[in-house]
Image (cartoon, rainbow, N blue to C red):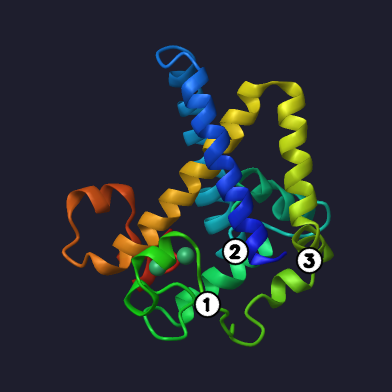
Amino acid sequence: MKHATQIKIGVAAHHVTLIALLLFDLVDAWAVNVVLACALMHVVQAEYLHRGVSHRWIRFDGWRQYVAAYVPHLLCSGSAFAFTLAHRTHHVYSDTERDPHSPRHIGVARVWLTLWPVFAAPTGIVRDLMRHPAFLQAHNYYAVSCAALYVLAAAVSFEVLAVLSLTCVLGFHRAGLYNTAGHLVTSDPWWLRWLTRHQRHHENPAKV
Ligand SMILES: [Zn+2]
Ligand SMILES: [Zn+2]
């Protein structure tokens, strides 16, 4: 997957969400849709992609590898393989020049917009994923499968497409906030503690 593809999907999702905001009934439909998108975003991003795949809380054997590799497409923020490669490298080289998305080295805007430089991951850091063909397959067909997902959602209804797009938009900005404030704000204010225990997570990655 080219990095530009990920950016284009994110931009498209922002546009669909904006159109949906203009078209939907802001009181009724959006209350439900926002809750749905928040729940989907949290489950896929925090529980599945971060804790489950990147920190190995779920099993990848047999058919489970396909679930683990393809469920993250619902978030449209990169394949499970790409996310895990970057996230594990971020843990190893955190806040150094080799960190893929350190706000201290490449700035807040580039981190937030995922305009990260090409980075060198430690050897064998995704060896466990390489043992399961579903991860590379899902990575190689990421753009096609995301496009298919969006077409399918649009075929069902514009509302489903809007919820999927909002999920992508929320996930995009939540990751931007974690990856910037989580590293730059060292005073541990309540709002950041409420949103993410990012510093604690870096001190002890088992606590996610
Ligand atoms: Zn971090
Ligand atoms: Zn982590």
- Give the residue number, with chain letter if any, for mark 2: 83
Marks 3/2 in contact by CB < 8 Å: the verdict is no
| Gap between marks 3 and 2 measured at Cα | 12 Å
Amino acid carrying mark 3 in the image: Leu
Name the residue: 56% across, 48% down.
11
Q: Which is more toward the observer, 186 or 109?
A: 109
52 or 183, which lies in front? Answer: 183
Q: Which is more foreground, mark 2 or mark 1? A: 1
First in residue order: circle 3 vs circle 2: 2
Q: Position of residue 124 (x, y in %)?
A: 67, 83
Which image quadrant shows ligand 1? bottom left
On the question of residue 56 being in view, the answer is no
Q: Label 2's element? A: helix
Amino acid carrying mark 2 in the image:
Phe
Residue at point 20%, 67% (across, down): 186
Q: Residues within 10 Å of mark 2 (few under 14, many from 20)?
A: some
Is residue 91 in view? yes
Instruction: Answer with the quarter of the image where residue 7 lies.
Output: bottom right
Would residue 20 appear left or right of 105 to someone viewing this image? right
User: What's the residue at 37%, 58% (across, down)?
Assistant: 178
In the depicted structure, whether residue 79 falls above or below residue 170: below
Where is 61 relative to 45, above or below? below
* Residue where numbered disc 1 is placed: 117
Structural distance between the alpha carbons of marks 1 and 3 = 21 Å
- Residue beneath disc 3: 136
Q: Which mark is residue 50?
A: none
Vertical side of 6 occupied by 16: above or below:
above
Quarter of the C terminus within the rendering? bottom left
Question: What amino acid type is highlighted by mark number 1?
Answer: Pro
What residue is drawn where x is 34% and y is 63%? 180
